Image: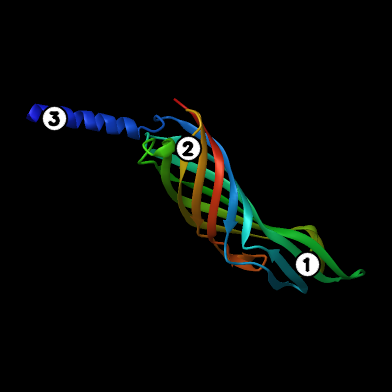
């Protein structure tokens, strides 16, 4: 009786291992996601030197992200994500010597660069062979405040082309999602993520860019 129990338990463990088997160790995954990034800050007016600056932003903005994953085992992978979104358009209203009052347009853009780990504990045993995962890690977030025409330089006392301001923030992120296989090498990727982003200074009058990302994409598995 004990022998049958041992055999049954062994078969159960082998079956479970097969059901949980994800991409083999050494698998590379590349892909892209697009979706929405939302946070609480929008439409801000502030002063830059003698120039009145207005950010025409939305709470929710289009987000684009590329990613690369590497599986150490079928359950554990290293992940690298590089994303971008524009917080909105900026208008600069100020006085230019020799020209009088003038307005220039620009934009506020955010670039999260993320590294972390992914855990996939329930691979291939759910409906549609979904492969849910959770991932988290650290991030370097770069914010840029630019102008297409010019910006006011309080030191030179004139408008000058280029980047008005830039900020960086070392922070963390966490999220989860699922892959839905279309074939052994092509997967639909659906995920949600939180990024904690607090600049020391500000980009277009805002320092709190923390928010949530929801996106859908395609992942390509390069099996070992």
Q: Is residue 57 left or right of residue 194?
A: right
Spot occupied by residue 7 in the image (x, y as percentages of width and height):
16, 27
As drawn, which residue projects farthest toward the right? 98
- Check disc 1 and report its element: helix, strand or loop: strand
Q: Which mark is residue 92?
A: 1
Q: Is residue 145 shown to the viewer in this render? A: no
Q: Is residue 216 left or right of residue 42?
A: left
Q: Residue at x 48, y 32 (%)?
A: 28
Spot occupied by residue 111 in the image (x, y as percentages of width and height):
61, 52
As drawn, which residue projects farthest toward the front? 127
User: Badge 3 is on which residue?
Assistant: 6
Spot occupied by residue 198 in the image (x, y as percentages of width and height):
54, 63
Mark in front: 3 vs 1: 3
Where on the picture, by quarter, is residue 57?
Answer: bottom right
Which sits in the foreground, 162 or 192? 192
Q: Which mark is residue 218?
A: none
Q: CA distance from mark 3 to mark 2?
A: 35 Å
Q: Is residue 132 above or below residue 60?
A: above
Q: Is residue 172 shown to the viewer in this render? A: yes
Q: Earlier in the sequence, mark 3 or mark 1?
A: 3
Q: Residue at x 58, y 40 (%)?
A: 32
Are there few (<14), some (14-19), or many (20+) residues within 10 Å of tag 2?
many
User: Badge 2 is on which residue?
Assistant: 180
């Amino acid at each position: 009786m004990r022998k049958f129990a041992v055999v049954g338990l062994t078969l159960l463990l082998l079956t479970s291992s097969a059901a949980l088997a994800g991409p083999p160790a050494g698998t590379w995954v590349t892909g892209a996601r697009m979706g929405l990034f939302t946070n609480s800050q929008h439409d801000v007016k502030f002063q830059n030197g003698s120039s009145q600056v207005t950010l025409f932003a939305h709470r929710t903005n289009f987000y684009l992200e590329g990613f690369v994953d590497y599986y150490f085992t079928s359950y554990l992978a290293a992940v690298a994500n590089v994303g971008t979104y524009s917080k909105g358009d900026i208008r600069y209203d100020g006085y230019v010597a020799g020209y009088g009052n003038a307005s220039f347009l620009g934009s506020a853009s955010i670039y999260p660069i993320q590294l972390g780990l992914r855990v996939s504990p329930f691979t291939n045993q759910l409906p549609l062979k979904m492969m849910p995962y959770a991932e988290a890690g650290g991030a370097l977030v770069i914010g840029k405040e630019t102008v297409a025409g010019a910006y006011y330089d309080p030191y030179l006392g004139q408008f000058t082309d280029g980047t008005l301001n830039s900020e960086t923030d070392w922070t963390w992120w966490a999220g989860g999602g699922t892959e839905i296989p279309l074939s052994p090498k092509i997967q639909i990727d659906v995920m949600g993520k939180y990024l904690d982003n607090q600049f020391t200074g500000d980009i277009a009058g805002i320092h709190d860019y923390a928010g949530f990302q929801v996106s859908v994409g395609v992942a390509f598995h390069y099996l070992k």
